[in-house]
């Protein structure tokens, strides 16, 4: 049996946030997003809101635009049309310098951890602090060791990326995503390449850190067990549009044919091979 999902509230019951992340409104809103690469249209009017202090999981078939959504949220891709608002600001109506400052309020865990091969675990995690702050090495060490302890890697500080497992690389990438104390953390398929046990252990780490730090987490995944375990809210994307968004427990009990088929992994339903 799968573990019970975390979603216990409806979207209407969630607290709202202000432009600085604490008040009334959503932390991030993507409205009527359209994006094409050449003749290939990825986003076809996608709209999503991300609520504060919650973990929202984005699910959908391969090639439907989940990772492209994350790149729009952090300001790495500009929409063809539509808006991306973060902390109350349309990120493509502000100066690039302000957009760069806004990115510091994000943490990102990439699919493979994206560690620098020439740096050990400690230096990988310290990198954002050294690049974006004027902290002393003593101050940096305190933060880095605290984050590494959170993810269970305090004994691996001197190891190179090629000396640690895939699960450890993910945890190191998570620690690095956290060192600037971000308000939004994006996870691009954190379970990719991990076996079920290590996926479950990584999910435990994500839940524990979120319970301690709060913040808004957005998790892109194909793994239904991950979605069940960590989600407060689920967004299901198909063909560049949102076909479901709501509380996780409601998603996993939905009668909608597409939602039911995708979340159960059934071969019978509206979703085919094309």
Image (cartoon, rainbow, N blue to C red):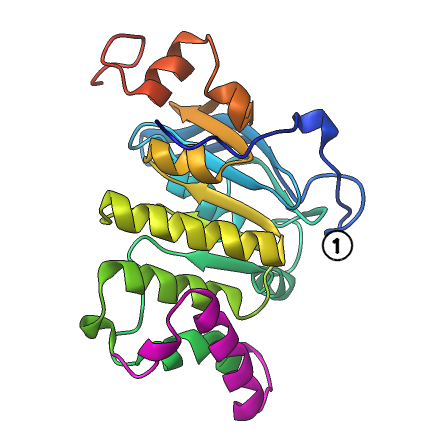
Residue sitting at x 67%, y 55%: 94
Residue sitting at x 62%, y 53%: 214
Residue sitting at x 66%, y 27%: 11
Q: How many marks?
A: 1
Tell me which segment is drawn in magenta: 132-159
Residue 148 within the magenta-colored segment of the rendering = yes
Graded by Cα atoms within 10 Å as few (under 14), some (14 to 19) or many (20 or more), the crowding at tag 1 reads few
Q: Quadrant of residue 51?
A: top right
**Regarding mark 1 in the picture, which secondary structure is present there?**
loop
Q: Which residue is mark 1?
A: 20
**On screen, 180 above or below 203?**
below
**On screen, 190 above or below 146?**
above
> Residue 194: percent from the left, percent from the top?
24, 49
Whether residue 190 is visible, yes or no, is no
Q: Quadrant of residue 274?
A: top left
Residue 147 within the magenta-colored segment of the rendering = yes
Query: How would you classify the magenta stretch by its main secondary structure?
Result: helix
């Amino acid at each position: 049996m799968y573990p019970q999902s975390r979603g216990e509230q409806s979207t209407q019951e969630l607290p709202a946030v202000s432009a600085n992340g604490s008040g009334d409104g959503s932390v991030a809103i993507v409205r009527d997003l359209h994006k094409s690469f050449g003749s290939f249209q990825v986003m076809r009017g996608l709209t999503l809101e991300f609520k504060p202090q919650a973990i929202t999981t984005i699910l959908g078939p391969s090639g439907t635009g989940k990772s492209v959504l994350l790149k729009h949220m952090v300001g790495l891709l500009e929409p063809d049309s539509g808006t991306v608002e973060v902390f109350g600001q349309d990120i493509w109506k502000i100066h690039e310098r302000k957009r760069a400052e806004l990115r510091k309020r994000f943490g990102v865990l990439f699919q493979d951890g994206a560690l620098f091969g020439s740096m050990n675990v400690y230096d990988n995690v310290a990198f954002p602090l050294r690049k974006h702050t004027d902290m002393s090495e003593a101050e940096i060490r305190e933060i880095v060791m605290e984050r590494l302890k959170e993810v269970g890697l305090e004994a691996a500080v001197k190891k190179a990326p090629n000396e640690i497992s895939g699960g450890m690389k993910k945890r190191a990438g998570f620690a690095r995503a956290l060192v600037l104390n971000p308000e939004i953390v994006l996870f691009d398929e954190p379970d990719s390449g991990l076996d079920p046990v290590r996926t479950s252990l990584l999910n435990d780490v994500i839940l524990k850190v979120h319970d301690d730090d709060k913040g808004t987490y957005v998790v892109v995944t194909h793994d239904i067990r991950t979605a069940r375990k960590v989600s407060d809210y689920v967004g299901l994307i198909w063909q560049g549009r949102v076909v479901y968004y709501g509380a996780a427990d409601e998603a996993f009990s939905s009668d909608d044919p597409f939602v039911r088929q995708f979340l159960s992994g059934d071969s019978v339903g509206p979703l085919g091979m094309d």
